[in-house]
Image: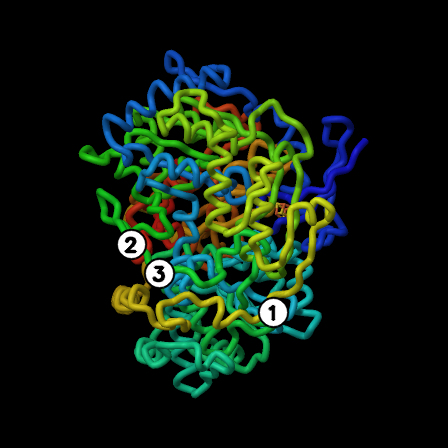
Amino acid sequence: MTTAYVTCPLCEATCGLEVTLDGATVTGVRGDRDDVLSQGYICPKGASLGALHHDPDRLRTPLIRRGGELVEASWDEAFAEIDARLPGLIDAHGRDAVAVYVGNPVSHNVSASVYLRALVKALRTTNVYTAGTVDQIPKHFSSGYLFGGAMTIPVPDLDRTEYLLVLGANPLVSNGSLMTAGDVRSRLRGIRKRGGRIVVVDPRRTRTAEFADEHHAIRPGADALLLLAMVHTLFAENLVRLGTLSSHVAGVDDVRELAADFAPETVTEATGLPAADIRRLARELAAADRAAVYGRIGTTTQEFGTLTSWLVDVLNVLTGHLDREGCAMFPLAAAGQANTAPGKPFRAGRRHTRVRGLPEVIGEVPVATLADEIETPGDGQVRALITLAGNPCLSAPNAARLDAALAGLDFMVAVDIYRNETTRHADVVLPAPSALERPHYDVTLYQLAVRSVANWTPATLTSDVPQEWRTLLRLSGVIAGQGPNPDVDALDDLFAADLAGRYGVAADDTRRGPERIVDLMLRAGPFDLTLADLEAAPHGVDLGPMRPRIPDVLSTESGKVELAPEAIVSDVPRLAAALTRSSAQGPGPVGEASGGRDLILIGRRHLSSNNSWMHNLEPLVRGSNRCTAQLHPDDAGGLGLADGDSVTVTARTGSIAVPVEITDTVRPGVVSIPHGWGHDVTGVRTTVATRHSGANANVLTDDFALDVPTGTAALGGIPVTLTPTP
Ligand code: SF4
């Protein structure tokens, strides 16, 4: 029997876990009480790390398409196939003919996230798509223009705040997103214990809303209007207090002007919130000594995602709640610190996509247009795709269209642990090691941590499956024309030397792969650490709470917080137009003529789900069906539906049938369906998920309903018509 201490790589909370093993068999997974960030917390997903490792459906051998079927092959055969097809395709059609799609699990995987750079550099394609372009680019965009860096994202100082205004986030279920806070439950309880208040704005009464002091069931997609009306109130009632920020902020008068037309009364109908409540929220926020506004997925996956993300921080600035203890603060990561100035000022739209002219942001283009790029002939047409731990056939908007587009590719390579709804289209599937078979350091998520911490996890178990960094370097070498068996160690030396040059430290060449890279990142970091320090601290190293960082953290052209950047505020007229439109139309269903009922679609999250990819683990899917359409009793009654009846939900892009769950936790006029389901397709090997298939909510989301500045799809706020399933 042995015990290993690991950082959970499944979500952004980065909990420390204690894994017990009997030889190579995982016998138990518990929260690590001594972990410096999570202090013993564990959720059902973390507890399933052993089930994930032992899942018989997890791929351990490469697959190659032969005669239309994916069959097992050796690693050499798999790379010979790639070498035979990919470089030739690039020669014939150009670099942009190959697209990359990077799934969310890559952010939690040091091997894949760091060495992805080598792959993208070898490909030199402009067609880089990520899961971030599904759900978080508006926050990078707004932070980039406000503060100068796309990762200069303030997070709430949860451990010291006394007033937390949460919009479109459900941290008691998500465990925090764009906010790394192991054991978020205790941290939120701490706010209440200190006599503080938590206010949640969400169309659903989520678990976090139940826990909060106050919940406002806003209409989907109206957050920007609420926040702008709060800004209006601050100016109208002379409540703007920049405090210590006053000499570091530009554009305050511009914001005052922009908010002038958005008095609370003007947004009452569109938001569904009384003007008196909007004014009170603004006054409470202004009066609180230590406060933070925090918005997440519901605020970034909507038609006004950029404006909402911007206004979250505008409110923090105008009320003096940015960069102070207990307020919204800038984390400081021990390694790969992405928000340390000086850097070049952020700029988006350095290029635009070929078919629809959507903008590049942080080197990525919106997945909402990937199907266009595959389907539309011409120079630069996408003919091949490489996916890394991504399942866009379930997670991208207008998923049925993308699924059909992927089936028409000339060539596809997937690096993944499952043959799933997306990888079933691949010509070559390259397996990756399980989470327990690879080392881990959360380079990405520690950039957003509410406390500076650093924790290194060596691989707990050995594996016959090559580490992803080796697979990605081998793939890079093939693409670079070095044949099917390039010298991976030499490529790694080059990669490390390049990074060492960039960070200005010497690489420790006694190490290889991510160990060498993390070590050099730590040594170049602000805490003077080495990997050896972390190897000696299995529960992690606590580096203290967040500290004020303005002005050093700013890298805008002016060196100030740019409160009214043109790239963002130029979208305010679109918001004003939407407000006029919504007032003119008024409420009222238009689909009733067909015997249906028009509602607005939103998503939701469950503690045991992580997008699409953990549904093959029995402990996480057992119990009642979670893929339901949650309806308010008034809407269910209007359709004559009872709990468990099937309802057909139809949008511009398609239809799905789902069981009804009647609940007053959703506001009338809204239907909530979780995404990540829809495992009932052929060609997959996910036995458990297929048994618990659910329906694919992204068949309903629209690849043409976008947050305009970033091209990010508005997954929430989609108009749908519900009819009882015949
Ligand atoms: S909350 Fe996230 S990091 Fe923590 S155990 Fe669960 S999945 Fe892992």
Asked if 581 appears above or below 399 in the picture, the reply is below
Residue positioned most to the right? 1
Q: Nearer the viewer, residue 69 or 675?
A: 69
Q: Earlier in the sequence, mark 2 or mark 1?
A: 1
As shown in the figure, which amino acid type bears the numbered disc 3? Phe
Q: Which residue is mark 3?
A: 304
Which quarter of the figure is the N terminus placed in? Answer: top right
Which residue is at 38% across, 59% downward? Answer: 141
Seen at 26% across and 68% down, the residue is 573
Q: Which residue is mark 2?
A: 349
Q: Residue furthest front?
A: 506
Amino acid at pointer 2 = Gly
Quarter placement of the C terminus = top left
Q: What residue did someone put label 1 on?
A: 213
User: Is 639 placed left or right of 335 in the picture?
Assistant: left
Q: Does the beta carbon at disc 1 come under 8 Å from ligand 1? A: no
For marks 2 and 1, give the one nearer the viewer.
2
**Residue 36 visible, this angle:** yes
Q: What is the distance, in whole Å, between disc 2 and disc 3 at their CAs? A: 18 Å
Front-most of 79 and 654? Answer: 79
